[in-house]
Amino acid sequence: AQSVTQLDSHVSVSEGTPVLLRCNYSSSYSPSLFWYVQHPNKGLQLLLKYTSAATLVKGINGFEAEFKKSETSFHLTKPSAHMSDAAEYFCVVSVRSGYQKVTFGTGTKLQVIP
Amino acid sequence: DGGITQSPKYLFRKEGQNVTLSCEQNLNHDAMYWYRQDPGQGLRLIYYSQIVNDFQKGDIAEGYSVSREKKESFPLTVTSAQKNPTAFYLCASSIVSGRNTEAFFGQGTRLTVV
């Protein structure tokens, strides 16, 4: 079994300040982990992915995430928020056990205040 | 450009009608997926297919049907048996082999029952 928990449904930051979106997962197998971003009424765009290589993963638009196995976490960070970062972010865990099982978190809405 | 195309972007359905949402991909991916998105619930898997002429029920398949007659196409029919069909529907595709199983998403179809 696997699950994903996004600890905050809404996060609000001021423009230029750091962003932290939290994600914890559980999995019986070695997972691949992803962060996706969704702007209103749009599809999902991949921000970054962890697939068992380096634990610190850099993605697009200045985002990065660190895979911490001991804490079962994969938090998303960015040093300085931009207005265009306002969107909904989804943490995803994917496990191959016979077939591919993908589980989405419930999402975190990021608000950026000018 | 390779990608996934969903159509239409907006769809209105009368109660008791069946409607079909289109999803086409030119990424040569074997696997395709349909998700339903409701506010605060993340994405829930409706159906998935890992090969032509084969598909499996996801977590919320009741009231939906799919077909996979071609590798490029995975249409979703929302039947009159689906009691609460108003939602945002996302189609995705991915490769099947290996751990690099990121999914690529279409831009979504917003279905409203009137």
Image (tube, coloured by chain):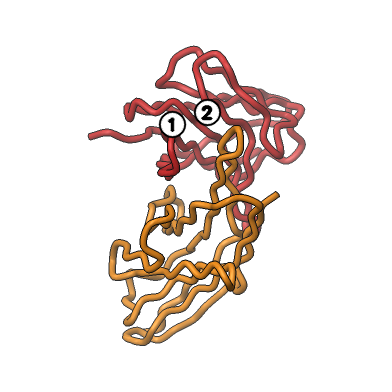
Chain colours: A orange, B red
Residue where numbered disc 2 is placed: B21
Give percent across and percent down for residue B80.
73, 26
Given residues B3 and B103, the one toward you in this image is B103
Left or right of residue B1, residue A84 in this image: right
* Quarter residue B41 falls in: bottom right
Sequence-earlier tag: 2 or 1? 1
Seen from the viewer's position, the closer of residues B83 and B114 is B83
Mark 1 Cα shell of 10 Å, populated few (<14), some (14-19), many (≥20): some
Quickly name the residue at label 1.
Answer: B7
What is the number of callouts on the image? 2
Taking depth in this image into account, of B77 and A97 the one nearest to the observer is A97
* Chain letter, disc 2 residue: B
What amino acid type should be assigned to the residue bearing mark 2? Leu
Expressed as whole percent of the image width and height from the top left, the position of residue B24 reads 40, 26
Q: What is the secondary structure assignment of the residue under circle 1?
A: strand
Residue at horizontal 46 percent and vertical 76 percent from the top: A111
- Mark yes or no: residue B114 visible: no
The crowding category of the residue bearing disc 2, from other C-alpha atoms within 10 Å (few below 14, some 14 to 19, many at least 20), is: many
Quarter of the picture holding the C terminus of chain A: bottom left
Q: Are marks 2 and 1 in contact (CB under 8 Å)?
A: yes
Q: CA distance from mark 2 to mark 1?
A: 6 Å
Identify which amino acid the numbered label 1 is placed on: Ser
